[in-house]
Structures are given as structure tokens and as C-alpha cells.
Image: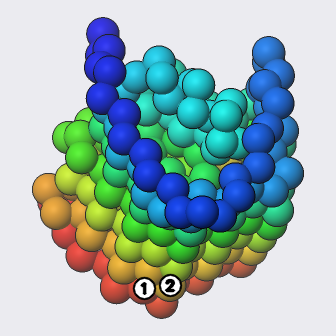
Amino acid sequence: GRLHTEVHASFASEKVKKMPAVKNGFKIEIFNVPTSWSWRCSPITLLFSFLFGIAFQPSAWYNNGSIKNSFNNGNVTGYGDYLGGIVGENIKDIFDSYNKGEIKGKGYDTVTGGITGINDSGNINNVYNSGIVDSMGYNVGGIVGQNYSGTLSNAYNTGTINGNGSEYVGGIAAINDGEIKNVYNIGKVSGGD
């Protein structure tokens, strides 16, 4: 499979709250990543997730718990399956959260979203994205790259969505196989085949 060791992270002097790990998922209450991240699918990402309280899914990491009152102001760049400003893959809950950082998917197979790359049967409510989402991967969305059997409600996007080389691109979701209600997009959307 994909196993790389490249991880880059830089931080301002702002505090980043540490979060505890939970075996079958985790709960993140409030966190802030003030500057930027860059990685290739790496087991080190798991360590960074626990140390800095942020959840990414570059190749095998996901949210199976509850994320609420969370935000990301930093830039996130990644390779792998799923990439998002809050979490890469969501299978549970994301509430009252936002992303203002630039999300840049570098892999051709990366599903990218401002909040999460994929919402797989999860529940996302009261979220927004104002950051640029730029990816050459499969699906690129302002909130989610793909909403797969999940629920997305009370969400909006104001960020620019660039999907040059992407198969599907959307202001809210590139692909929806679930339920989306009470959402809007005013961000510029470009790309898609």
C-alpha cells in the first residue's frame, strides 16, 4: 500500500490544545491549527493527531466519534484517500465547526473537502468553509468531497473551489449519495471533467 514518511508542520506561537486518544474513535471539543501542514500518507500523522488534537485521514485515519465547536485556520496539504480541513473521513458527527484554511489535495486519487473529504454515513450540522479548496483529485467540494449515505445540514461555503483535473467539483459537495438540506454556496467553483 501507500506508506510514506514525509510530514511537515510549522506552527505559530499560538497554543494548540492536546486531545486524548480513544480506541474506537475520539472526541475533539475545540482545537486550532494556526499555520500549515503538509504530509504524505504516514503513520506519523497518527502521532500528530494525538499531540495536536486534529484528525486527518491521509490513508487510514477517520473520525468515529464526535467533533464539535472545532475550527481550522491553518493550511492543509496532503496526499492520500481523503483530505479535509477538520477531518479526512467522517463516519460519525461533526457539529458547529468551520474551516478557514486552504485545503490542497496533491494526489490524483484524493477526495477533498473544506470540512471533510468524505462523509460516510455521518451527520454534519452547522458548519461552514471560507477557505480555498484546491485539488486535482477525484471529487472536490466546498464542504465535502463526497457525501456517501450521510446527512449534511445547515452548511455554507464562501471559499473558492478549484478542481482542475478533478472528475466532479461542487460548491457544497462534488457527489451526493445521501441527504443535503438547508445549504448554500456563494464561492467560485471551477474545474471538473
Q: State the image coordinates of residue 155 (x, y, percent, origin top left).
A: 67, 73
Q: Which mark is residue 158?
A: 2
- Colour scheme: rainbow
Q: Say few, some or many: other residues with alpha carbon within 10 Å of mark 1 (under 14 / 14 to 19 / 20 or more).
A: many
Q: Is residue 181 above or below residue 31?
A: below
Q: Is residue 7 above or below residue 187?
A: above
Image quarter where the C terminus lies is: bottom left
The answer to whether residue 142 is left or right of residue 89 is: left
Kind of residue at badge 1? Gly
> In this rendering, is residue 131 above or below 93?
below
Q: Residue at x 32, y 21 (%)?
A: 5
Q: CA distance from mark 2 to mark 1?
A: 4 Å
The quadrant where residue 50 appears = top right
Identity of the residue drawn at 27% across and 70% down: 162
Judge whether residue 94 can be spotted in this image.
no
Q: Are marks 2 and 1 in contact (CB under 8 Å)?
A: yes
As helix, strand or loop, the secondary structure at mark 1 comes to loop
Instruction: Decide which of 120, 127 is in the foreground and name it.
Output: 127
* Image quarter of residue 80: top left
Q: Residue at x 59, y 45 (%)?
A: 87
Left/right placement of residue 160 relative to residue 65 reads left
Drawn side of residue 177 relative to residue 2, left or right? right
Say few, some or many: other residues with alpha carbon within 10 Å of mark 2 (under 14 / 14 to 19 / 20 or more): many
Point out the tag, 2 or 1, that comes first from the N-terminus. 2
Task: Specify the quadrant of the image occupied by residue 63.
Answer: top right
* In-front residue for pair 167/74: 74
Give the residue drawn at x 43%, y 57%: 36
Q: Check disc 2 and report its element: helix, strand or loop.
A: loop
The front one of 142 and 153 is 142
Name the kind of residue labelled 2 in the image. Thr
